């Protein structure tokens, strides 16, 4: 693997005329790409993984004064949209916390829930305080890297094995538990297992739930080459 720092790719034209920034992946014209510093790299398939922005279409006009160039909402210490009391923002569209990850989105949600309860009770809201950096990134079914908070303000770097163990199901079981279920097909009173149950929980159509249900079973590829 080669890592190139302090440089970036020039706009890439694909065979057929598509532009990489507008496609999930492209086949670069001529089988090569070039960086801004003139470095040529052989490439027959390119996945364009930079420049993503939040989808701010639903709120960009209404909150035009407090949306930055990335589509992120500016919030106060309580995660209320600035200038709009009792309207909160969480997740990628919330401009609070050191990074836009699911870990901080969960922290946002917990803080907002507590502050909504405080508003209902007429008590004092508490400022949001982001936790220390924590990340876990898988690469296929064999590789990965991450970091977790360590003692005395340190950070512990994790390698392939612990990351694969931590994210064996990509935290899906934790999400179901947070929603109040043991798993994707957990039965609750008055609701049958199956697609109707998924549609009810995830607020989707019966057709969407059917497709999701069909995709729940995942076969283990064993020792297959995942590269």
Image: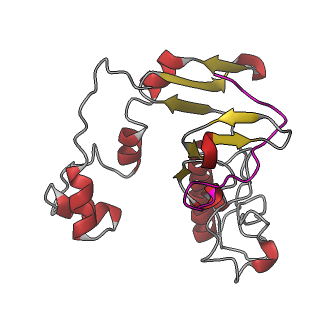
Q: Residue at the spot x=38%, y=42% of the render?
A: 172
Residue 1, placed above or below residue 185: above
Residue 17, placed above or below residue 132: below
Q: Is residue 223 left or right of residue 132?
A: left
Q: Main secondary structure of the magenta part?
A: loop
Residue 48 visible: no
Asked whether residue 60 is drawn in magenta, I would say no
Q: Residue at the spot x=54%, y=42% of the render?
A: 45
Q: Residue at the spot x=86%, y=39% of the render?
A: 37
Q: Residue at the spot x=78%, y=63% of the render?
A: 76
Q: Is residue 173 left or right of residue 45?
A: left
Magenta part of the protein: which range? 1-19
The image quadrant that residue 148 belongs to is top right
Residue 194: x and y in percent read 16, 56
The image quadrant that residue 63 belongs to is bottom right
Asked whether residue 3 is drawn in magenta, I would say yes
Q: State which quarter of the image contains the C terminus.
A: top left
The image quadrant that residue 202 belongs to is bottom left
Q: State which quarter of the image contains the N terminus.
A: top right
């Amino acid at each position: 693997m080669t890592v190139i720092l302090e440089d970036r790719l020039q706009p890439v034209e694909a065979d057929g005329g598509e532009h990489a920034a507008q496609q999930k992946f492209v086949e670069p014209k001529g089988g090569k790409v070039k960086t801004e510093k003139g470095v040529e790299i052989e490439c027959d398939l390119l996945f364009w993984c930079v420049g993503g922005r939040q989808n701010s279409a639903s709120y960009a006009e209404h909150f035009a004064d407090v949306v930055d160039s990335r589509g992120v909402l500016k919030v106060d210490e309580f995660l209320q949209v600035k200038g709009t009391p009792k309207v909160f923002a969480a997740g990628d569209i919330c401009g609070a916390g050191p990074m836009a990850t699911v870990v901080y989105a969960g922290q946002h949600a917990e803080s907002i829930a507590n502050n909504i309860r405080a508003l209902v009770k007429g008590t004092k809201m508490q400022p949001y305080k982001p936790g220390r950096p924590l990340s876990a990134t898988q690469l296929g079914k064999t590789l990965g890297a991450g970091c977790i908070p360590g003692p005395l303000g340190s950070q512990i770097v994790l390698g392939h094995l612990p990351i694969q163990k931590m994210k064996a199901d990509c935290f899906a079981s934790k999400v179901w538990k947070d929603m109040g279920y043991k798993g994707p097909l957990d039965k609750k009173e008055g609701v049958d297992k199956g697609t109707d149950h998924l549609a009810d929980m995830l607020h989707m159509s019966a057709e969407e739930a059917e497709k999701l249900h069909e995709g729940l079973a995942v076969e283990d590829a064993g020792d297959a080459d995942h590269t």
